[in-house]
Image: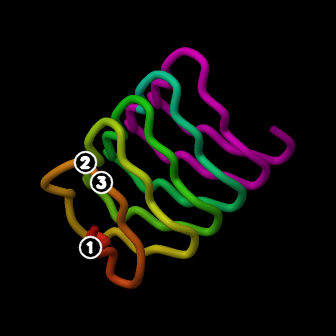
Amino acid sequence: MHKSCINANAHIGKNCIINTFANIEHNCIIGDHTTISTGAMINGDCIVGSSVFIGSQCVLSDKVTIPNDTIIGSNAFVNKSLPSSGVYWGTPAKKAKS
């Protein structure tokens, strides 16, 4: 989308949406069917699985891994790799209780 930025050696899977002002830094891998919402910042060497939704204004620190089938709520800050699929939100991001 408009004004998104995908940097060197980033790999974007099939059927993804990289929305307005989203930034995907160097050496990231974005899985198939994933949405990166407006203004999200995916820092270098991150791995984002398939069928993931990253909310608006989220920030992923360097070298973070997000498992398949995960939702990250808007404005979340993910400062470490997530251990399992689910819904995460907050600063730092924590798994929502069901």
Residue contact between numbered discs 3 and 2, judged by CB atoms under 8 Å: yes
Q: Name the residue at 20% across, 57% down.
A: 81
Position of residue 92 measured from the top left corner of the image (x, y, whole percent): 32, 81
- The magenta span reads 1-29
Q: Amino acid at mark 2?
A: Ser
Q: Which residue is mark 1?
A: 97
Q: Which residue is mark 2?
A: 85
Q: Is residue 28 magenta?
A: yes
The type of colouring in the image is rainbow
CA–CA distance in space, label 3 to label 2: 4 Å
Q: Report helix, strand or loop for mark 1.
A: loop
Position of residue 96 measured from the top left corner of the image (x, y, whole percent): 31, 72
Q: Which residue is mark 3?
A: 86
**Residue 86 image-quadrant placement:** bottom left
CA–CA distance in space, label 2 to label 1: 13 Å
Q: Name the residue at 26% across, 73% down.
A: 97
